[in-house]
Image (cartoon, grey):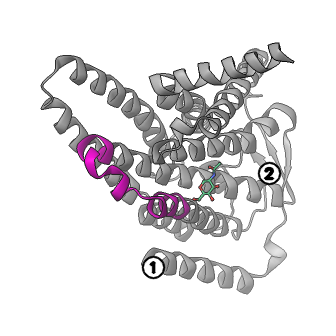
Amino acid sequence: ATPVLFSAEIICQVESRAQMSGKNYTRVTKFILVGFSNLPELQGLFLIMFLAFYLITLTGNLLIILVTLAEPALHTPMYFFLRNLSFLEISYTSVTLPKMLTDKAISFAGCAAQMCFILFLGGTECFLLGAMAYDRYVAICNPLHYTHILNSTRYIGMAAVSWLSGLLMGLGHTSVIFTLPFCDSNEINHFFCDIPPVLKLACGDTHLNEIAVFAVTMLFLPFPFILILASYFLILNMVLKMPSPEGRRKAFSTCSSHLVVLTLFYGSASVMYLRPKSAYSSDMEKFISLFYTIITPMLNPIIYSLRNREVKQALRRTIARKGFLKRRK
Ligand SMILES: *[C@@H]1O[C@H](CO)[C@@H](O)[C@H](O)[C@H]1NC(C)=O
């Protein structure tokens, strides 16, 4: 309950500060997302690439949702979390990519809403990845008690807590940022309303806000991060003790691909959020944030399930069943 109280406190403080300073500071009513238009020679290429990424992300994640729902064999906590993650990834990319592909102007409220959703979904993703790592740990290291430890109350509860924590993080960060005055430039040198590029546009002293952003992040993110590290450490420990080299190789390859995605997501996000303002150029920032906004949502379904034999078989069965129905009609 303490993190909840603490972030509520931050929100209230910032809100009252904004009320005191009055609304006359807020002169910017809309923002322009510069995106990659400062690299005109690459724009066409980027457009096609991002459209392709978006379609792959939508298809891959939608497929996972449908297959895990349709197949009774996949009605386990692991696939519940995966379905939740896929649903999240679809929403996550839909908050940034369509806007990025179509329109550069975004209203003040739209920008705030976009930031809130991105941080809400990004925060939830951190927690869901933590829950999934814990799920793998129990399944591999304590298989006999798996159904008892991860009973339905518990895994649904873990997902619910993930969404709630993400929501608090999104609201916390967004209210810290958007109560700042914006007065001069309205050109955001980025492809969506992320914290660092928006913070650069704020006028006045942003020190306290930066500290608040750091505090909100540090309040939430260490929990899933430590859960992930501890889970994979215990899994690796277990895998190294496996007698059969075949089993060891298989478990190792699964874990290492998970770790690659986790590193990409956590690495790029912490480089972006856990550092002082303007430590990198804007172009560098755009490049870094591509990883957690576009690359990992696309890779997650591939890494977590399409490489997995259970899912491949279920997919084949579902397609075969559909084909069979069609032929009979
Ligand atoms: C994700 O988890 C939440 C909370 O447990 C649940 O209410 C929701 O239905 C899940 N979504 C999907 C698509 O499985």
Kind of residue sitting beneath label 2 = Asn
Horizontal and vertical percent position of residue 60? 64, 27
Residue name at image x 43 percent, y 79 percent: 2
Where's residue 157, x and y in %? 50, 64
Determine if the magenta segment contains residue 174: no
The tag earlier along the polypeptide, 2 or 1, is 1
- Picture layout, residue 7 above or below residue 200: below
At label 1, the amino acid type is Ala
Q: On screen, 141 above or below 185?
A: above
> In the picture, residue 86 is in which quadrant?
top right
**Residue pointed to by mark 2:** 186
Give 313 or 290, whichever is nearer the viewer: 313
Dominant secondary structure of the residues highlighted in magenta in the image: helix
Residue 310 on image: x %, y %: 47, 27
What residue appears at the point 37 percent right and 33 percent down from the top-left corner?
259
Could you say which quadrant of the image residue 324 lies in?
Answer: top right
- Residue 185 visible in the picture: yes
**Which stretch appears magenta?**
137-161
Mark 1 residue element:
loop
Comparing labels 2 and 1, the label whose residue is closer to the camera: 1
What residue lies at 65% left-to-right and 67% top-to-bottom? 204
Across and down, in percent, residue 303 comes to: 48, 27
Asked if 315 appears above or below 327 in the picture, the reply is below
- Disc 1 designates what residue? 1
Density class for disc 2 (Cα within 10 Å; few <14, some 14-19, many ≥20) is some
Q: Residue at x 66, y 69 (%)?
A: 175
Q: Are marks 2 and 1 in contact (CB under 8 Å)?
A: no
Q: Quadrant of the N terminus?
A: bottom left
Q: Is residue 138 left or right of residue 173?
A: left
Mark 2–mark 1 distance (CA, rounded to whole Å):
38 Å
